[in-house]
Amino acid sequence: MAHAFSKAGPEGWSCGKCGRKLEPVSVNVEYMGSSFFVELPGCPDCGSILIDSELAEGKMLEVEKLLEDK
Amino acid sequence: MNRPEDRPSRTSPDVQFSGRTPGGAIGRATGRTADGAVNLADGRIDNRTGDRIDDRADGRVDNRADGRIDDRVDNLTNQVVGDEAVADKTGVPPSQKAKPAADDPYGPLRRVTGSTLRPGGLELTKRALSFCRFPQGASLLDAGCGQGATLELLLASGFKAVGLDADPAQAAQAAQAAQKAETRIGFLEDLPFADASFDGLFCECVLNLTDRERALREIARTLKPGGFFILSDIFKKGGTLELPAAKQPEPKKNLLASSGTSLPTGSAAPSGTDRPVRSGFRSDGPAGEASSRPPDCRQGALTIREMLTQLENLSLVVDLVEDHQKALDSLAAALVWEYGAKGYAQLLGLGGCLEAGSKEKFTYALVVARK
């Protein structure tokens, strides 16, 4: 994927497209018709949101399982 | 004016899960402004025609003469919070989350839900207000007002707001949050108000914790003729949902001009029982009386059909039934996100209705009935 995030040392992630350091952004997450607000790192310029593997394999997976069980 | 924690940011990007994301999916923000629209569930009923749920294309339930439900939603939104987006249907943005007191037993839940402490938050309250179309100055009781989130909304919408809670600490916080509202301490099973006191009565995520039959009798007693009972709560899934033969609603009246007692400005609501204050939504109910209160909202839940029967037995005409399963699911999801699956399991004692995978399935619904 051409547009990616890059880790910029100890300060954390930055946007591969814009070069801006990611900032906490309020994000409305939707899955299977349910939605809720969370805070995730995002690019202040282009609005892209980073979901790292720890999050994807952790709480996001747990939420998916919960909603799929309902 | 709503408090900041009740409002999402104006530019809340949406991210849609795209299924499993083991490699760390990147979601693109759309930058879509949260519009605060009520997420209307699919399963609604129309009591004018007796249609079964899901039989109609739009699934809407509306027993009023003109059938208009949504036409005032936008106006109401503007009236309450200006052009700001209204609270989301699940909770509040992380940056605006409430910071509950350390000794608040519902603190972990409140952190996610904000001050409303219920699925759907204020969205369902606004939905009910848009449906009922109370005139300005209407006298509205929030029975089980908690910390007063609904009272604030009612005041901001131009209504005369009265709050009741059995927990003195909650009632005190409500009085602080909604200073122009009158607040009382008391039980739903023994409302400290005269007959025909209110144009509308809200009972949001509370009725299942009461001795329901007694509470419903009190609710019917204190409503003015033509007044609305607004119920949102947990319901068991199952049973048929078709409504009884539709009754023709009476022409719309100015509720304030109907019979009943108006509340004098700046004074206590009329009380038919000037008894000492009692405290707590305790399992023992009103002092000195045996109670059939359920231990939690799950055990106290009925099916929607059973609830409608109870309302009809009190000669209340059911005008609106909406299923808001997604509000319940979204709250559960937000709690898992916040606390993880294990932490969520520990929270179930605060809200057993949230449990996934249990034999008994639950939903959340909004019901509006008219006296």
Image (tube, grey):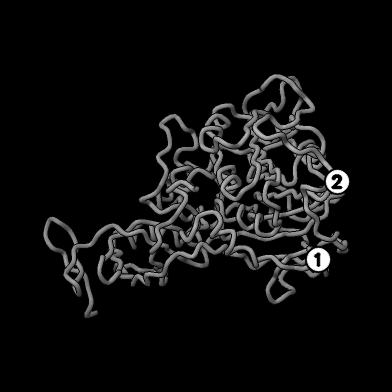
| Position of residue B199 measured from the top left corner of the image (x, y, whole percent) | 75, 46
Quadrant in the rendering for residue B287: top right
Residue B282 position (above or below residue B326): above
> On the picture, is B136 further left or further right than B80?
right
Quadrant in the rendering for residue B33: bottom left
Quadrant in the rendering for residue B51: bottom right
Looking at the image, the residue that sits furthest to the bottom is A2
* Residue at point 49%, 57% (across, down): B82
Q: Amino acid at mark 2?
A: Leu
Q: Residues within 10 Å of mark 2 (few under 14, many from 20)?
A: some
Which chain is home to disc 1? B
> Which tag, 1 or 2, sits closer to the chain's start?
1
Q: Which residue is denoted by mark 2 in the rendering?
A: B314
Which chain is home to disc 2? B
Residue B357 position (above or below residue B148): below
Q: Which residue is denoted by mark 1 in the rendering?
A: B65
The front one of A9 and B240 is: A9
Which SS class for mark 1?
loop
The front one of B181 and B55 is: B181
| Position of residue B169 measured from the top left corner of the image (x, y, whole percent) | 54, 28
Looking at the image, the residue that sits furthest to the left is A9
The front one of B208 and B280 is: B280
| Position of residue A16 measured from the top left corner of the image (x, y, whole percent) | 18, 72
**Looking at the picture, do discs 1 and 2 lie on one chain?**
yes
> On the picture, is B114 further left or further right than A22?
right
* Residue at point 77%, 59% (across, down): B319
| Position of residue A63 measured from the top left corner of the image (x, y, whole percent) | 44, 58
